[in-house]
Image (cartoon, rainbow, N blue to C red):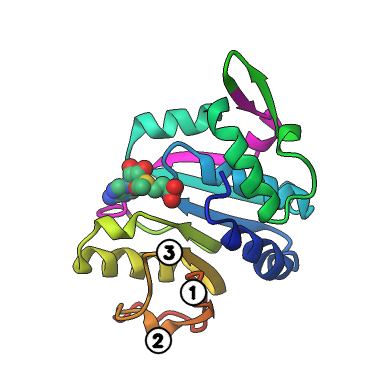
Amino acid sequence: MFRDPAIFLALRTQVLPVLASYPRINIWQAGCATGEEVYSLAILLKEEGLYDRTRIYATDINDVALARAEEGVFSLRNLKDFSVNYLKAGGRHSLSDYYHAAYGHASMDRSLRENMIFARHNLASDGMFCEVNMIICRNVLIYFDRLLQNRVLRLFRDSLVRQGFLCLGSRESLQFSDIVEDFGAIDADLRLYRKTLISTGAS
Ligand SMILES: C[S@@+](CC[C@H](N)C(=O)[O-])C[C@H]1O[C@@H](n2cnc3c(N)ncnc32)[C@H](O)[C@@H]1O
């Protein structure tokens, strides 16, 4: 959890204060795998007092991964690293406040699950989500060729509200993509972007 803590710190300090001005917040986490990022996000939102008005749509193509994500059970072996990352990401408590440990596993607190919606979604063929305020899709596009990357990035652009946020993985970028003109970089090193235009859907 909280892998690349600098990005979670940037979400906490630069993105969530902006999202706080919206009465409802919709977040799409695409390629959620087994859920480490989605629980990290829920904790972040809870600590910033925004989770009650947030829906996180967590999607993946892999049903087995989705079922594990929904369970929210992680090996205790990983929790030490997760805790270090959590504190580097500006964590306000102890990560252990958010899970129950038993038999070598950590079960994430059920309250974190409340506003998560898990769904199968294939980025290569399925349609857009409407009016999301932020999309997080990290370490997924690296597995796609340029054509597919552009399809997915257009899908993200068209799913985001005006001035919505997009967060990619450290080896992914909007540079050289079809949608680069539609976004400004909040922090190019962290691959954190903000949509600047009302999409025409033309490119
Ligand atoms: C390396 S994991 C990234 C997980 C997480 N975002 C992270 O950074 O830790 C890549 C995920 O992308 C998913 N994926 C691969 N192709 C996909 C597709 N066409 N549509 C949706 N998800 C896909 C995989 O099932 C896998 O869970």
Residue density around tag 2, few if under 14, some if 14–19, many if 20 or more, within 10 Å: few
- Kind of residue sitting beneath label 3: Ser
**Disc 2 marks which residue?**
181
Instruction: Note whether ligand 1 is within 8 Å of mark 1.
Output: no
Of the residues tagged 1 and 2, which is closer to the observer? 1
* Residue 170: mark: 3
Asked if 198 appears above or below 4 in the picture, the reply is below
- Kind of residue sitting beneath label 1: Asp
Q: Which residue does the image show at 74% across and 64% down from the upper left?
A: 20
**Disc 1 marks which residue?**
189
| Residue 124 in view, yes or no | yes
Give percent across and percent down for residue 6. 59, 62
Q: Earlier in the sequence, mark 3 or mark 1?
A: 3
Question: Which quarter of the rendered picture does the C terminus lie within?
Answer: bottom left
| Mark 3 and mark 1: Cα distance apart in space | 8 Å
Give percent across and percent down for residue 59. 43, 45
- Kind of residue sitting beneath label 2: Glu
Question: Which quarter of the rendered picture does the N terminus lie within?
Answer: top right
Residue density around tag 1, few if under 14, some if 14–19, many if 20 or more, within 10 Å: few
Q: Is 161 left, or right, of 152 in this rendering?
A: right
For the residues labelled 2 and 3, say whether their Cβ atoms are less than 8 Å apart: no
Label 1 sits on a secondary structure element that is loop
Give percent across and percent down for residue 29. 49, 52
| Mark 2 and mark 3: Cα distance apart in space | 20 Å
Q: Nearer the viewer, residue 75 or 130?
A: 75
Label 3 sits on a secondary structure element that is loop
Give percent across and percent down for residue 43. 68, 45
